[in-house]
Image (spheres, rainbow, N blue to C red):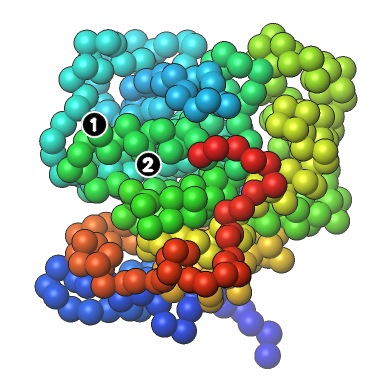
Amino acid sequence: MFDLTWLAGHAKTAFTHSPKTITLTTKAGVKQSFADFVRQVTPPCRLNPLLFNGHLQTMWTAVKEAGPPIYYKRRVFQSTHELYPGQFAVDFVVPVPEAFEPDEELPERTLYYSESEFEKVRKEDDTPMLVCLHGLSGGSHEVYLRHVVAPITAAGWECCVVNARGCALSKITTPQMFNARATWDVRQTVKWLRETFPNRPLYGIGFSLGANIITNYCAEEGEKCEFKAVIACSNPWNLELSNKGLQRSWLGSEVYSRTMGDNLKRLYGLHKDQMLKNPALKDEDIMACKYIHDFDRVVQCPTWGYPTEGAYYRDATSVDALTAIRIPFLGISAEDDPISAVEAIPYAEFKANPYAVLVTTNWGGHLSWFQLGGKRWFATAVADFLTNMHDNIDLNATAATNGIKTDAERKYPVWDPTNRRLTVPL
């Protein structure tokens, strides 16, 4: 019988996880599996029936929407990484100012911290804090990100956004922008947050490419990860498969891949003088790029030393990394996402890691999930997960009662999911 539930906006939601996920302990002392917790806090997925497939959902993001007004103060950090020098910008959510004079060199509602203001940032409070990583060529100003930040900060949380290098009108001081496995700026930010706010529980979320990066980061940190829980939303997961998925159709190639390629070329244009200090980069080759994989071939490969874009994708992908995560980890993906291909979703890896649960919907597009009225379902799902996790779960007790053997306790051969071909110290 033909399914007409989409006429009422009813998307189908599925949960993928290990047969026995980690045990959470509530603050009342009740034991609950992580899988049951996710099922309990995930709201039904009800979407706009006029946007009845992933293409319509995703393309609707092109409609200009003001989104929730979020104000930021920016701090530029100097990288401490020996092989990835330069600087990167972190935007911190601040209360609505009484008076606001826009800075034309920054995104809207964003100002720099003054030195005197930043000296007073350190606090001893135990307010939960969310660390966000945006998608490809985006930034703290993105509407999809602000849809998540708004309800979280309204619930009393603090929040910051780690802008990828060169994004959100940030400057670069070396001929390198970001790439899909560059976890070092996130690592430095988290370390700084832990030192500056020693009592704040830290949580993380990544969107699209940022989801791939934060997944890799959590895996590299393993049991030492400072995050209490992390969400990966619309992660492309297997970058090589997602790239092939884009190229197999006219819409994928000429709309999505071409749009992302154009966005990257515009980003390059903002930093052209700095980027061309790398003698391996040629302006005429970059400006001739049409698609995202073209840009990766002529910019990312010579910048980072990859022989092909396929090697870059395989090296940066987060599928294997998923099995090394040792904190509560939630993935949210739509199976009709035209950018993050369904073939790339690591169902088996979610089943292999008791710390991870995947929520998939059969409908929703890429960072979309638009509902009637313009709200986005995933923003509600994220806020419900995070607030319930922080308010109701004793994460210290949870960490103490869930042990998986470490590599040191295993006999060889040992599976090393974070072993990369591009050798870079963490």
Residue 59 visible in the picture: no
- Give the image location of residue 156, x and y in percent: 20, 44
Return the residue found at the far bottom: 1
Q: Residue at x 40, y 77 (%)?
A: 21
Residue 79 horizontal side relative to residue 291, left or right = left
Residue 54 image position (x, y, % from top left)? 66, 59
Q: Is residue 43 above or below residue 172?
A: below
Q: Is residue 98 left or right of residue 20?
A: left
Name the amino acid type tagged 2. Answer: Val
Specify the quadrant of the image occupied by residue 390.
bottom left
Secondary element at image label 2: strand
Labels 2 and 1: the sequence-earlier one: 2
Q: Which mark is residue 131?
A: 2
Residue 53 sits above or below residue 426 on the image:
below
Q: Quadrant of the N terminus?
A: bottom right
Q: Position of residue 266 (x, y in %)?
A: 70, 23
Residue at the far front: name it: 411
342 is higher (above) or lower (below) than 162? below
Q: Nearer the viewer, mark 2 or mark 1?
A: 1
Q: Position of residue 361 (x, y in %)?
A: 55, 69
Name the residue: 34% across, 10% down: 101
Q: Nearer the viewer, residue 219 or 26?
A: 219
Q: Which residue is mark 1?
A: 196
Residue at 63% x, 65% y is 345
Residue 93 visible somewhere in the drawing: yes
Q: Tell me: 75 left or right of 158.
A: right
Which residue does the image show at 29% across and 11% down from the upper left?
114
**What amino acid does circle 1 point to?**
Thr
Which residue occupies the foreground of this view, 201 or 261? 201
- Nearest to the observer: residue 418 or residue 35: 418
Depth check: 204 or 87 in front?
Answer: 87
**Label 1: few (<14), some or many (≥20) within 10 Å?**
some
